[in-house]
Amino acid sequence: MNIKITGKDLKATEAIKDYIEKKITRLEKYFDTEHLDVQVMIRLERELQIAEISTSYKSDRFRAVTENKDLYASIDEDIDILERQIRKAKTKKERLNKDESLKIKDMPISDNHEPDGEVIKTTYYEIKPMSVEDAKLALEEKNNAMFLAYIDIDTNKVNVIYRLKDGKNFGLSEPEV
């Protein structure tokens, strides 16, 4: 982790530097610290002490600026703000990755070519080990999905659960032994 602490109209004493470094360790649990860069700017404006903390990790950037009569309180607020921003961003990325586990690629069809039993669409999906009940719940969560392939945790074989035409019940395809 690279930490750069600068002061403007306010000297960054060893006590302040130690306090900042101690508080920034709270962010280590979210990142590989080798690639984490932190810039801290402390300054004084009138009677207010301002702490500005910016972090960058690969392409992600987070920033918090607070002012308080006490510099230590301002630093604490900044760390809390950064933690919330980081958690929110990580949750959003995880949700996007989960939603994108089913990728659809369409092949273009030329105007003068009529497909005769050709594969014109490919769907990629992730197969996870789960029970029949878990697979049913997972399929129910996906409103527009008609089937779900999964690995049965009891038999360790690929099964497919699918919606029946009545929209309420499910069918299950299992491989023969």
Image: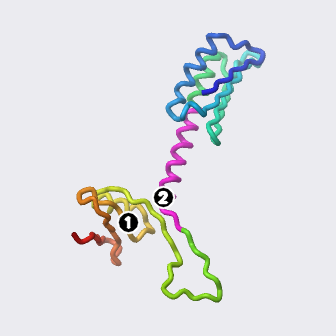
Q: Distance between the residues labelled 2 and 1?
A: 12 Å
Q: Earlier in the sequence, mark 2 or mark 1?
A: 2
| Relative side of 95 to 20, left or right | left
| Image position, residue 62 (x, y; %) | 64, 36
Which residue is at a point 63% across and 22% down the rendered structure image?
A: 74
Secondary structure of the magenta portion, mostly?
A: helix
Identify the image quadrant of the C terminus: bottom left
The answer to which of 136 and 2 lies nearer the viewer is: 2
Q: Residue furthest front?
A: 177
Q: In this view, does 120 lie above or below 2?
A: below
Q: Residues within 10 Å of mark 1 (few under 14, many from 20)?
A: many
Rendered view: 66 above or below 7: below
Q: Give the amino acid type for the residue marked by disc 2 in the picture.
A: Ser
Compared to residue 165, the image places residue 59 above or below, namely above
Q: Tell which of 70 and 144 is nearer to you.
A: 144
Where residue 106 sits: x, y (%)? 57, 72
Q: Quadrant of the N terminus?
A: top right
Circle 2: element type:
loop
Q: Does the magenta-highlighted stretch encompass residue 172?
A: no
Instruction: Return the mark for residue 11.
Output: none
Q: Which mark is residue 101?
A: 2
State which quadrant residue 75 falls in.
top right
> Residue at 51% across / 53% down in the picture?
97
First to last magenta residue range? 82-104
Residue at the image point whose x is 69% and y is 14% from the top: 12
Q: In which quarter of the image is residue 22?
A: top right
The percent position of residue 112, horizontal first and vertical second, equals 64, 89
Residue 148, which numbered label? 1
Sort mark 2 into few (<14), some (14-19) or many (20+) by Cα contacts within 10 Å. few
